[in-house]
Image (tube, helix red, strand yellow):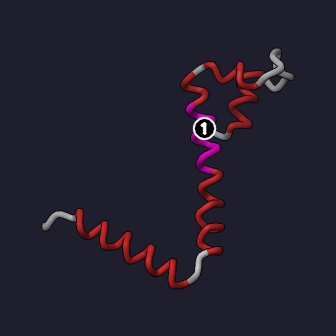
Amino acid sequence: MSAFSIVGQLTDGTRPPFSDVSAALDNPALRKQVMQEMGRRGGEKGGKARAARLSKGRLKAIAKKAARTRWKSAKPG
């Protein structure tokens, strides 16, 4: 569910009766949904944009560190 559809449901597709959208987000559950959607959209773009800016050497160093961390915490089977 997107933030746009949540606001649409909240306002029945009409102009909201309040001038500030933050007043609609007083509901913690609704606010959480909206923030999750916004974070998801930013994350989809952010990782690719960051990787494009990094050099191959830096990407390799990050990958090695991540692999070491994963295997360090892995428990023998």
- Above or below residue 69? Residue 3 is above
> Which of 63/29 is in front?
63
Looking at the image, which residue sits at the far right? 15
Q: In which quarter of the view is residue 34 placed?
A: top right
Question: Looking at the figure, which quarter contains the N terminus?
Answer: top right
Q: Nearer the viewer, residue 67 or 54?
A: 54
Q: Position of residue 20 (x, y in %)?
A: 79, 22
Q: Which residue is mark 1?
A: 35
* Rendered location of residue 58, percent (x, y): 51, 79
Element type at mark 1: helix
Q: Nearer the viewer, residue 77 or 42?
A: 42
Magenta: main secondary structure equals: helix
Taking the magenta stretch, the answer to whether it contains residue 57 is no
Quadrant occupied by the C terminus: bottom left
59 sits left or right of 41 in the view: left
Q: What is the three-letter code of the residue carrying label 1?
A: Met
Residue at screen point 71% across, 24% down: 22
Q: Residue at x 44, y 78 (%)?
A: 61
Q: Which residues are magenta?
A: 32-40
Number of numbered tags placed on the structure image: 1
Q: Is residue 24 above or below residue 55?
A: above
Q: Is residue 40 toward the left or the right of residue 57 in the image? A: right
Q: Position of residue 25 (x, y in %)?
A: 66, 23
The image shows residue 41, relative to residue 72, as above or below, that is: above
